[in-house]
Image: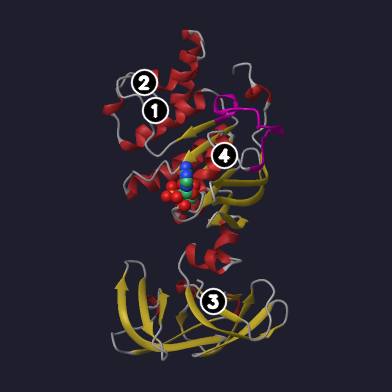
Amino acid sequence: MPDNIGATAKSGVVELSDLEVRYGDFQALQRTNLKIESGEFFSFLGPSGCGKTTLLRTISGFQSPTLGQVKIGGIDMRAAGPNMRPTALIFQNLALFPLMTVAENIGYGLRVRGVPRRDRDVTVSRLLDIVSLLGHGAKKIQELSGGQKQRVAIARALAVEPSVLLLDEPLSALDLKLRQYMRAELRAIQRRIGITFIYITHDQAEALAMSDRVAVMNAGRIEQVGSPRSIYSAPETPFVASFVGENNIIRGRIKRFDGTEATISTALGDFTGRAAGNLHCDQPAAYFVRPEALTPYQPSHETCFAGEIVEILYEGNSSQVTLRMPDGEKLIARSVTSMTASPMLGERLRVGCNRADGIVMAIEGSHP
Ligand SMILES: Nc1ncnc2c1ncn2[C@@H]1O[C@H](COP(=O)(O)OP(=O)(O)OP(=O)(O)O)[C@@H](O)[C@H]1O
């Protein structure tokens, strides 16, 4: 590694303190405080335009913050440009050199830094092994599959020994099968080398499958940070509940709140679930329940919904049933048909769940 700031920032801890980014009058990143641990696979997940790329560019030094500070390995990066930071960035389009071989692409950063040929070759071989491309070093970039190109881009970024690898939607150009395969590959590569990976994506399946922790972003703000499991099973805001996975949303007003559970009064009746945050009586709120939590009604169920079947989608190992509720709204249940005699369109079906399956959250105005 060259003699620069990166050389002293050994650890891959990334700390964002009171970080804000404005483009003119537009606030692209609201005040953000966050610590990403060394060796973590950390994802920023959010819809287009929520500020993910802005955040990644600010960490890598391509964008200056309007306020606040980025520290990497405990060192303030304010004075360090992109080339002086212990980070490497992989873009969506990979930006590989088409006329160079795989090995030349991977060794490029080392050549620019004046690393002798023999040392370069050793590093390139090691990296080809890490990304499972041994034997492909002499190939031209055009001779590779999409997934192999991804792995060359990763190896090229790793060649300069960054403490933190920043990945900007690197899988989005691949077809679904390859994307799923590369998720597992990326995770395995990260485990093998143990450096911090910061990944941005709008694809929740990708973020949940690969990450140690996920930050869900909305309109320039982090709404929730947690493990994939906690983000999915205990969303803290209506946005997270509706953006990550599917949720049925039944709107109403808070009738009862005891600190941990809340009952909501809706056009379909009263429903009790886990309370997210502090609630007060008569506040506009919604009851969220995941389609897979709704199973054919049994007397032991604490919550019941009854509606007319208006759609059945056979999905192989399960089915998705859409019910039209008495208020005209739709409710989706999954896996229902695997447990009942085949339901028919137009039939009335009762599905149920337990209190712990539903979450009651305050909603503002028309949101979500
Ligand atoms: N250079 C710029 N000048 C002005 N506005 C910008 C600039 N770059 C980004 N923005 C705006 O800032 C907001 C956040 O953009 P950003 O690219 O960070 O979002 P994103 O979450 O990465 O979106 P995507 O997934 O579509 O790439 C957007 O509303 C965008 O239009």
Question: The residue tagged with tag 1: helix, strand or loop?
Answer: loop
Badge number at residue 365: 3
Question: What x and y, as percent, mark residue 22?
Answer: 56, 47
Question: The residue tagged with tag 4: helix, strand or loop?
Answer: helix
Quadrant (top left, top right, bottom left, bottom right) of the N terminus: top right
Tag nearer the camera, 4 or 1: 4
Q: Say whether disc 2 or disc 4 marks the residue closer to the N-terminus.
A: 4
User: Is 256 in front, or is 177?
Assistant: 256
Q: Residue at x 33, y 44 (%)?
A: 174
Check residue 124 for magenta coloring: no
Question: What x and y, as percent, mark residue 127?
Answer: 47, 24
- Marks 3 & 2, CB-CB < 8 Å contact: no
Q: Is residue 330 above or below residue 241?
A: below
Identify residue type, mark 2: Gly
Q: Which residues are magenta?
A: 67-87
Q: Which residue is mark 1?
A: 133
- Left or right of 50, for residue 68: right
User: What separation in Å lies between label 3 and label 2 (alpha carbons)?
Assistant: 58 Å
Q: Is residue 72 above or below residue 105?
A: below
Q: Which residue is mark 2?
A: 137
- Marks 4 & 1, CB-CB < 8 Å contact: no
- Marks 3 & 1, CB-CB < 8 Å contact: no
